[in-house]
Amino acid sequence: MTAGKFITFEGIDGAGKSNHIAYVAQLLRAHGKTVITTREPGGTPLGESLREILLHQKMHLETEALLMFASRREHIAEVIEPALSRGDWVISDRFTDATFAYQGGGRQLALEKLDTLEAWVHPHLQPDLTLLFDVPLAVAKARLDAERVLDKFEQEKADFFAATRAEYLRRAKAHPARFHVIDSTRTIAEIQQEIATVIDRLY
């Protein structure tokens, strides 16, 4: 059986990443792949319950990080690993890079603690490709201002998002083999053309 691939979508709130998940799933299915789309936090019944808590309740920083990884452990065990073992392709709206960016960068939790949690929760699993949708803070803010009621992360101030974006870009530089940074200020057509070229390398 052909091994499945694991693709993650990352970016600060307002970067526009979620707009392209359906496109990539359609692209893969057109190439005969079985595709699972999922998200973090969430992806399982337990994970979705934790998502509601994480996005709307205030809590200690370390509690927040631990709950993110608790949701992730369930997600990996119940969805991601079984799908990959079947040869399916998995697309996840956020994964561990988001925890480094938001809890590590934005909230300033020591990255060494997140390294420890990552090594515990998924020591042998990393995405085959991480698409990082990057935009200036002003663009992200304008997009968020036009949206629905915002969750607690989306309501954060500019310095939080600046630190979150910086950590994302640091991660991309540290892991160039799996990251592809996309300028998400361009048109949807331009972005999708670039995505298609990147995805072609995975077949």
Image (cartoon, grey):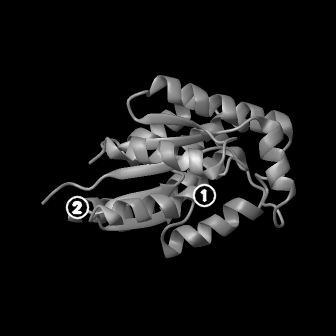
Q: Is residue 46 above or below residue 15?
A: below
- Which residue is more in the foreground, 195 or 4? 195
What type is the residue that disc 2 sits on? Answer: Gly
Q: Residue at x 83, y 38 (%)?
A: 138
Q: Which residue is mark 2?
A: 87
Q: Secondary structure at mark 1?
A: helix
Q: Is residue 150 above or below residue 123?
A: below
What type is the residue that disc 1 sits on? Answer: Ser
Q: Residue at x 64, y 35 (%)?
A: 104
Q: Which residue is mark 1?
A: 18
**Residue 177: % across, % down:** 38, 29
Q: Is residue 86 left or right of residue 46?
A: left
Q: Is residue 120 left or right of residue 146?
A: left
How far separated are the C-alphas under marks 2 and 1? 24 Å
- Which residue is more in the foreground, 112 or 47? 47
The answer to whether residue 43 of the structure is visible from this angle is: yes
Name the mark on residue 153: none
**Residue 5: % across, % down:** 31, 52
- Mark 2, residues whose alpha carbon is within 10 Å: few (<14), some, or many (≥20)? some
The answer to whether residue 77 of the structure is visible from this angle is: no
